[in-house]
Amino acid sequence: MVADGRKKLDLVMAETHKQIAEIEEQAKADILGVKSTSLLVDAKINAERDVKLARIRQSGSARSDQLKVESSTYVATKEAEAEREIAENKAKCMGLSAEAESEAAKQLTAQRQYTKMMRSLQSMRGLASNKDVCVSGNNGDNIVAQLVANSNSGMVLGLPSNLGS
């Protein structure tokens, strides 16, 4: 009887160990299933996140490129407008300068004429006050004028004045 009881007990114990082993194997399989499912869900979430980030980056990059083009176009337009205005102002300046020079030329004509006449007069005074200069022109048959001119020319050349006598 004791042996039968022991046998039954061993049988129950073996069956219990078998069931425990099956339960542990099922638990391990379930844990692996849950892990793989969670990894799959995690991968899906990461993939969706990556796709959304790529779309956002592409959208941001496209918007950035658009803004760069718009800003460079705006800058080029403003530079062209500034250059046009500068050219207009330079043209106005040149016109006003030419007009002022024209007006000044009209007003300075009389002064230039006066200055020219005064220089001529000063030149004549200088010639008149110089004793070594003899001015002769068309003397015709005026022999005295020719003799005076010839003697003064001789003095200028350094010839003695008594050479002709």
Image (cartoon, grey):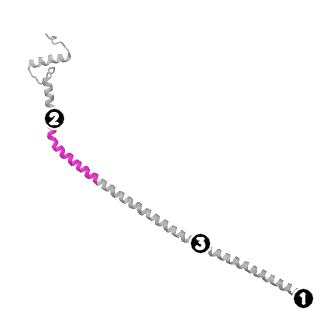
Give the amino acid type for the residue marked by disc 2 in the picture: Lys
Whichever of callouts 3 and 2 sits on the residue coming sooner in the sequence is 3
Kindly indicate the quadrant of the structure image that contains residue 21.
bottom right
Give the alpha-carbon distance from disc 3 to disc 2, as whole Å: 98 Å
Residue 32 in the figure: left or right of residue 82:
right
- The local secondary structure at tag 2 comes to helix
- Neighbour tally class for label 2: few under 14, some 14-19, many 20 plus, Cα within 10 Å: few
Q: Would you say 49 lies left or right of 102 here?
A: right
Residue 136, how many percent across, how many down?
Answer: 13, 23
In primary-sequence order, the first of circles 3 and 1 is 1
Q: Quadrant of the N terminus?
A: bottom right
Of the residues tagged 1 and 2, which is closer to the observer?
Answer: 1
> What residue type is disc 3 on?
Ala
Picture quarter with the C terminus: top left
Q: Is residue 162 above or below residue 100?
A: above
Q: Name which residue lies at 40% across and 61% down.
A: 73
Q: Main secondary structure of the magenta part?
A: helix
Q: What mark, if any, has residue 47 been given in the picture?
A: 3
Kind of residue at badge 1 = Asp
Stretch in magenta: 89-115
